[in-house]
Amino acid sequence: MIAAICFYVQSKHVDAQQVPKYKVAVGFYEESLCPYCAQFTTKVAEPLFENGLSDYIDFDLIPYGNAKNTSEGLVCQHGEAECRLNRVFACAIDQAKHQETWFPFITCVEGKFGPDIEDDVESCADAAGLDYPDLRDCATGERGDALERAAADATDALVPRHQYVPWVTVNGVPLLDDYANLKTYICVALEENSRPDVCFESSALRGPTAGKSYRSISWLKRVENALLSAFG
């Protein structure tokens, strides 16, 4: 029963079945001016790119969050600046293609979180090796429109629907308010003989279960309870 739930509850944007077997699909549904999203980016996700665990994940960032399409146009939770930055983020991902390039750009911008955050986009683009004029043209043009619609569609297609941001999934399974423990969930989701040494640096993977399979009943039960809560 648990396995069936985990198999069918998939994000349509992050399809775990299309990710290489040795990788884990991580979905990060966010909005650019959300302080909790900035904290997740810099405190939880960035270390994965520093300790090598990013080699084992397919990281998909979807910048839309709690935005709403209304009769008067798109309304973002934190105002027009957030709508503009969401498009910049989407364009950076589209331009860079590889997570090792676009993620440092987004981390750089989110690390400048504050009222003048947009002023740092150009310098962060330069630092990440992105073409700022192309990025600006994309964000203010038709390509930005298309990417914004794609992000909206991906967010709206979540099953179960997101309840807040950051909304983080591992192989399509939402972590709900336990997203700070993303590293542990990634390590558990990896096949036992594919786990890198960094997985065993976490206290969650030490103790009497060290060296054993982490497809544990307790973890699966936790996932099942989280899913039931999300649907309930």
Image (tube, rainbow, N blue to C red):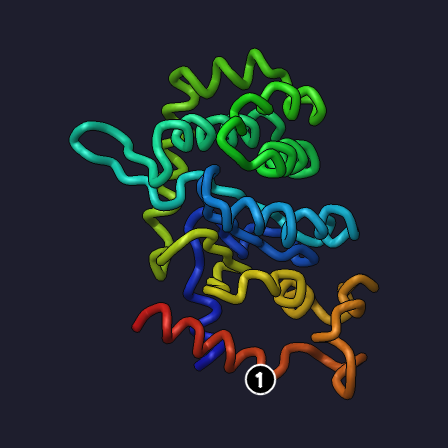
Q: Residue furthest right?
A: 197
The residue closer to the viewer here, 148 or 31, is 31
Q: Residue 140: x, y in percent?
A: 42, 16
Q: Residue 164: x, y in percent?
A: 39, 55
Q: Residue furthest front?
A: 115
* Quadrant occupied by the C terminus: bottom left
Q: Residue 141: x, y in percent?
A: 40, 15
Residue pictured at 62% horizontal, 66% vertical: 185
Residue count near mark 1 (Cα–Cα under 10 Å), binned few <14, some 14–19, many ≥20: few
* Quadrant occupied by the N terminus: bottom left
On the picture, is 108 further left or further right than 152? right
On the picture, is 142 further left or further right than 179? left
Labels in figure, total: 1
* Location of residue 41 with respect to 80 vertically, above or below: below
SS label for mark 1: helix
On the picture, is 198 further left or further right than 100? right
Q: Residue furthest left?
A: 71
* Location of residue 212 with respect to 44 vertically, above or below: below
Query: What amino acid does circle 1 point to?
Result: Ser
* Location of residue 137 with respect to 92 vertically, above or below: above
The residue closer to the viewer here, 137 or 24, is 137
Q: Residue 38: x, y in percent?
A: 55, 44
Residue identifier under label 1: 218
* Location of residue 225 with respect to 181 vertically, above or below: below
Residue pictured at 77% horizontal, 78% vertical: 206
Residue pictured at 35% horizontal, 28% vertical: 80
The residue closer to the viewer here, 160 or 126, is 126
